[in-house]
């Protein structure tokens, strides 16, 4: 038996029905650690930010509930992963970057070197001038040219 059901209502909002029949509207899915443990725990929260349901491992949910839960998570989180640096306008900041992400090619402006944060030895988080965050999941897995361009800013 599934501990809860997650569906969309007529307005496109996520709704939650617990096994005891309790119904919650306008819920949102939130990962506990979206960068360091993206496959780990997540919660369903009400519109006031109170936790309703905690899921230890999203991957352990039965299909199709897992698919809906992941869809709710992905709609809330927007963290494109940079796969390749294609060009930078200059090695002084601010500079315009052209990058290949897991969501396609894009351009953004890096205001300063302080907008590149190292989370772990190989994970970087980059904030563009508009506040959009990009992640480099594994710096060592990037191609040589991308690493060379990044080294100028690190």
Image (cartoon, grey):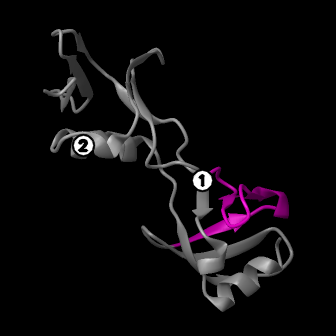
Q: In this view, does 90 lie to the left or right of 120?
A: right
Q: Give the range drawn in magenta.
A: 106-131
Residue, x 24% and y 22% (percent of image)?
Answer: 16
Mark 1 and mark 2 lie on one chain; the one further toward the N terminus is 2
Residue 21 in picture, x, y percent from top left: 15, 10
Residue, x 52% and y 35% (percent of image)?
Answer: 32
Q: Is residue 99 left or right of residue 19?
A: right
Residue 7 in picture, x, y percent from top left: 18, 31
Residue 48 in picture, x, y percent from top left: 46, 14
The secondary structure type at the circle numbered 2 is helix
Which label is found at residue 27? Answer: none
Q: Verify whether residue 149 appears in magenta.
A: no
Please name the residue that numbered disc 1 is placed on.
132
The secondary structure type at the circle numbered 1 is loop
For label 2, count other residues whose C-alpha is less than 10 Å away and answer few (under 14), some (14-19) or many (20+): some
In the image, 18 versus 148, the foreground residue is 18
Q: Verify whether residue 129 appears in magenta.
A: yes
Please name the residue that numbered disc 2 is placed on.
66
Residue 10 higher or lower than 121, as above or below = above
Q: Is residue 47 visible?
A: no
In which quadrant of the rendered image does the N terminus lie?
A: top left
Q: Can residue 52 be seen in this view?
A: yes
Q: Distance between the residues labelled 1 and 2?
A: 27 Å
In which quadrant of the rendered image does the C terminus lie?
A: bottom right
Residue, x 59% and y 60% (percent of image)?
Answer: 134
Residue 101 higher or lower than 6, as above or below = below
Residue 19 in picture, x, y percent from top left: 18, 16
Furthest residue in direction right, as rendered: 92
């Amino acid at each position: 038996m599934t501990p809860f059901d997650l569906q969309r209502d007529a307005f496109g909002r996520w709704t939650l029905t617990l096994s005891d029949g309790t119904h919650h509207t306008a819920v949102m899915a939130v990962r506990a650690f979206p960068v360091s443990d993206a496959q780990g725990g997540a919660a369903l929260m009400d519109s006031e930010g109170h936790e309703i349901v905690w899921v230890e491992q999203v991957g352990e949910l039965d299909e199709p509930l897992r698919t809906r839960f992941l869809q709710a998570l992905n709609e809330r989180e927007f963290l494109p992963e940079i796969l390749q640096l294609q060009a930078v306008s200059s090695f002084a900041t601010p500079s315009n970057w052209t990058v290949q992400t897991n969501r396609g090619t894009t351009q953004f402006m890096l205001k300063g070197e302080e907008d590149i944060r190292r989370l772990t030895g190989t994970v970087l988080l980059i904030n563009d001038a508009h506040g959009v965050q990009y992640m480099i999941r594994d710096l060592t897995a990037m191609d040589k040219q991308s690493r060379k361009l990044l080294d100028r800013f690190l």
